[in-house]
């Protein structure tokens, strides 16, 4: 599916149907995400693995349960993601500083390096695409849309998922077993 920028920008009135705007935005964000992942040095990582590494890079060490809550996934899924990253040497576990029942995960030097090179590659691809594919007016319009997109992402209407508590789950801390 190809969405032409001039249909929603460039002289005409912007579309005002929220459902149609949501459909187009959903498609474009997914396409942009795929293009950015393809440009990244971390392209061999899954989107979930990339997201967890990015969160650890921005927010520092975290428990499995905390990451699962922040990433809107179940602790079991987060354990699998962290196990794969740990196996590749991209994250490391350490005892929780105040709760001996838990562990915290952080990026290793190799993980931080991969994260940094991936960000540089994505930024480089996108900056080049903006510079060569958009007019100065279109670039300004895109820059003006960024605060609006940020407001949508940070909206209290954004979906929140609190993973359900499973009373028979063998590990109530949600941490990855060794």
Image: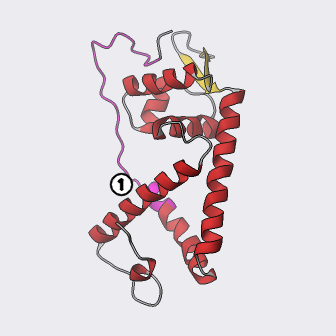
Q: In which quarter of the image is residue 108?
A: top right
Q: Which residue is drawn at 56% across and 9% down?
A: 100
Residue 137: x, y in percent? 59, 83
Q: In which quarter of the image is residue 30?
A: bottom left
Q: On screen, 27 above or below 115? A: below
Residue 103: x, y in percent? 55, 16
Horizontal side of residue 58 vs 72, given as left or right: right
Residue 165: x, y in percent? 31, 23
Name the residue carrying label 1: 157
Q: Identify the element where label 1 is drawn.
A: loop
Q: Nearer the viewer, residue 9 or 98?
A: 9
Q: In which quarter of the image is residue 163?
A: top left
Q: Give the range drawn in magenta.
A: 150-175
Q: Which residue is drawn at 64% across and 39% down?
A: 115
Split into 4 quadrants, where in the image is the N terminus? bottom left
Horizontal side of residue 50 vs 160, given as left or right: right
Q: Magenta stretch containing residue 45, yes or no?
A: no
């Amino acid at each position: 599916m190809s969405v032409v920028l001039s249909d929603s920008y460039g002289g005409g009135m912007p579309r005002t149907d929220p459902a149609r705007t949501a459909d187009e935005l959903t498609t474009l964000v997914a396409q942009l995400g795929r293009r950015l992942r393809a440009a990244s040095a971390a392209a061999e990582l899954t989107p979930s693995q990339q997201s967890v590494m990015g969160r650890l890079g921005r927010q520092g060490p975290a428990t499995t349960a905390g990451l699962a809550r922040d990433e809107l996934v179940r602790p079991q899924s987060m354990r699998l993601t962290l196990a794969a990253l740990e196996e590749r040497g991209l994250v490391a576990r350490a005892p929780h500083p105040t709760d001996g029942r838990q562990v915290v995960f952080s990026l290793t030097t190799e993980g931080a390096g991969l994260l940094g090179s991936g960000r540089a590659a994505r930024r480089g691809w996108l900056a080049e695409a903006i510079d060569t594919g958009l007019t100065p007016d279109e670039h300004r319009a895109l820059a003006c849309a960024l605060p609006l997109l940020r407001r949508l992402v940070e909206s209290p209407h954004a979906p929140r998922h609190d993973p359900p508590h499973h009373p028979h789950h063998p590990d109530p801390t949600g941490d990855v077993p060794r």
